[in-house]
């Protein structure tokens, strides 16, 4: 008995074992069939021990995911353009969603909302707006973004569109979806008038094509991208 008590895991060691078992159970069973009993067995503990700390499945899963992938814990990327920076942010969300699957995301979000716990959404919203505002501020300095477009509502738009697709539509986020959100929806709303031509010519140079001196708003380039007047 003394040896068993001595080897029993406690505190952070037990918490890490529980979180590891949660992640394994999510991969094996998904969210709807997620079993706290199996988590307890995998972590070498009991259901009452888990329930004392996390009274619901949703809170347990959220805690494990937050420990494994802190929400937007990374710094704002600096690729040299607003387009590149926002694409990097949304691709990160896409990767996280792909690792979890839409079923897990939807199940967790639904239960948290049912329980009245909106702290996860507040955390994601606050951090994402801060990061994208930083990106847009740099864009203003480069002449890419109109200064009057620096608003929290516009900064939240890309993440809101991602959340709509993952949570409400329960659809994965493809590379094409990410580019459409950035190129067709977000950038036209925040870009300075001349920035479209600047960005387009930069992309033409990267593709080995000469820059245009006059760009027509209704034209498309060789890749089918809309070209804007400068």
Image (cartoon, grey):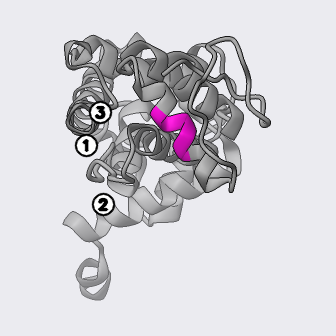
Q: For this view, does 96 lie left or right of residue 56? A: right
Identify the residue at horizontal 65%, vertical 15% (top origin). Answer: 169
Query: What separation in Å lies between label 2 and label 3 (alpha carbons)?
Result: 33 Å
> Quadrant of the image for the N terminus?
bottom left
Q: CA distance from mark 1 to mark 3?
A: 35 Å
Q: Which residue is mark 2?
A: 15
Q: Secondary structure at mark 3?
A: helix
Secondary structure character of the magenta stretch overall: helix
Q: Quadrant of residue 8?
A: bottom left
Q: Earlier in the sequence, mark 2 or mark 1?
A: 2
Q: Are marks 2 and 1 in contact (CB under 8 Å)?
A: yes
Figure quadrant of residue 82: top left
Q: Is residue 111 above or below residue 174?
A: above
Q: Secondary structure at mark 2?
A: helix
Residue 174 position within the rendered picture, expressed as x and y whole percent measured from the top left: 69, 36
User: In x, y percent, where is residue 89?
Assistant: 43, 42
Marks 2 and 3 close (CB-CB < 8 Å): no
Classify residue 44 as left or right of residue 70.
right
The disc at residue 33 is none
- The vertical placement of 117 against 202, above or below, is above
162 to the left or right of 123: right
Q: Is residue 45 at all visible to an observer of this figure?
A: no
Q: Residue at x 46, y 20 (%)?
A: 186
Q: Disc 3 marks which residue?
A: 132
Query: In front: mark 2 or mark 3?
Result: 3
If you read the primary sequence from the N terminus, does the residue marked by circle 1 or circle 3 appear first?
A: 1
Residue interval drawn in magenta: 198-202
Mark 1 lies on residue: 53
């Amino acid at each position: 008995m003394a040896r068993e008590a001595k080897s029993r895991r406690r505190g952070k060691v037990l918490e890490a074992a529980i979180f590891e078992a949660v992640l394994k159970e999510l991969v094996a069973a998904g969210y709807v069939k997620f079993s706290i009993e199996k988590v307890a067995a995998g972590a070498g503990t009991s259901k009452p021990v888990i329930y004392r700390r996390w009274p619901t499945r949703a809170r347990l899963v959220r805690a494990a995911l937050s420990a494994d992938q802190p929400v937007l814990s990374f710094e704002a990327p600096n690729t040299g353009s607003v387009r590149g920076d926002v694409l990097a942010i949304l691709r990160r969300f896409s990767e996280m969603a792909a690792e979890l699957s839409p079923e897990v995301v939807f199940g967790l979000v639904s239960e948290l909302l049912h329980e009245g716990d909106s702290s996860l959404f507040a955390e994601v919203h606050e951090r994402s707006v801060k990061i994208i505002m930083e990106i847009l501020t740099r864009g203003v300095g480069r002449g890419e973004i109109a200064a009057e477009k620096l608003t929290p509502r516009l900064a939240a738009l890309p993440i809101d569109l991602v959340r709509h697709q993952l949570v409400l539509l329960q659809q994965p986020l493809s590379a094409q979806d990410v580019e459409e959100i950035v190129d067709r929806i977000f950038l036209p709303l925040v870009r300075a008038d001349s920035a479209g031509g600047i960005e387009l010519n930069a992309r033409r140079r990267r593709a080995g094509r000469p820059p245009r001196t006059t760009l027509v708003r209704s034209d498309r380039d060789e890749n089918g991208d809309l070209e804007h007047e400068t």
